[in-house]
Amino acid sequence: MEASIYNKAYKYLERKKYYNYEKYTHGQAVSIGMVTACEFGEKKGYTKEGTTKRLVELLKAYGLPTFD
């Protein structure tokens, strides 16, 4: 199920043209996709509340984008 959530986030980013190497590198797009999937998981009850906040803090500490 987790892979399914990630795939939905990944496809969303592709549709929004974030993952086309013009604005973000692959790794940066993955970072944004992770946050999108985590938020989705929290909203659906698959992911423990507060996980997105922790993930965003970690990704930002490494200089990775989390959203526009």
Image (tube, grey):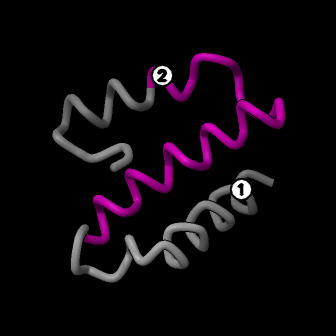
- For the stretch drawn in magenta, the main secondary structure is helix
- The residue that label 1 is drawn on is 5
Secondary structure under tag 2 reads helix
Q: Which mark sits nearer the N-terminus, 1 or 2?
A: 1
Q: Which span is picked out in magenta?
A: 25-54
The CA span between labels 1 and 2 is 18 Å
Residue tagged 2: 53
Vertical side of 31 occupied by 47: above or below = above
Query: Looking at the image, which residue is at 50% across and 77% down?
Result: 14
55 and 22: which one is in front? 22
Identify the residue at horizontal 48%, vertical 22% (top origin): 53
Q: Residue placed at 72% from the left, 39% from the top?
A: 41
Instruction: Answer left or right for 4 relative to 15.
Output: right
* Residue 3 placement, left or right of 30: right
Residue 8 x %, y %: 68, 65
Residue 62: x, y in percent? 19, 37
Disc 1 residue crowd, few under 14, some 14–19, many 20+, Cα 10 Å: some
Residue 44 lies, in percent from the top left, at 82, 37
Q: How crowded is mark 2: few (under 14 residues within 10 Å), some or many (20 or more)?
A: few
Three-letter amino acid code at disc 1? Ile
Front in this rendered view, residue 58 or 17 = 17
